[in-house]
Amino acid sequence: EGQDIDTEYCVFDLETTGFTVDYDEIIEIACVKYQNMQEIGRFNELIKVDRKLHPRIVEVTNITDELLEKDGKKYKLNKYTSTKISLK
C-alpha cells in the first residue's frame, strides 16, 4: 500500500547444510524479481559443498548430494563474497 506502481523488489531464498552460521554452508540461492506485483525475473543456483548432506537437510530441502554433484557450481560463498545475479 502506498508504493509506486513501478516498484521493483526481489525475494531471496537460501538453503543451507544446517543452521549454524559459523559452520554450515549455502547449498542453494534462489531469487524472484517482481515489478508491479508481476514476476519479471528469476535466478536459481545450486552450490557444491565438500561434505555429505545430513539426512534431515535432504528431507527438508529435497536437495541431495547427487543433485549437488551433478548440477551444483563449485565456488565458496561467505560474508565477504559479492556476486552479480542475472535474473532471467
Image (tube, helix red, strand yellow):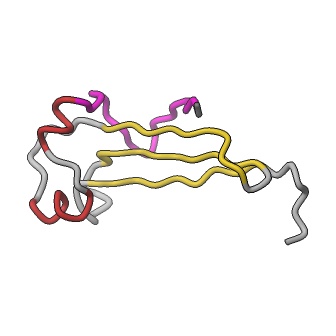
The one nearer the camera, 47 or 77, is: 47
Which quadrant of the rendered structure holds the C terminus? top right
What secondary structure is the stretch in magenta mostly built from?
loop
Q: Residue 68's image quarter?
A: top left
Residue 42 percent across, percent down from the top left = 55, 40
Residue 1 percent across, percent down from the top left = 85, 72
Residue 24 is left or right of residue 87, and the answer is left
Residue at the far bottom: name it.
1
Residue 42 is left or right of residue 75, and the answer is right
Magenta span: 71-86
Residue 86 is left or right of residue 74, and the answer is right
Residue 34 located within the stretch drawn in magenta: no
Q: What residue is shown at x 31% (from left), y 34% (from top)?
A: 76
Residue 65 percent across, percent down from the top left = 13, 43
The one nearer the camera, 7 or 75, is: 7
Position above or below: 31 against 4: above
Q: What residue is shown at x 87% (from left), y 63% (from top)?
A: 3
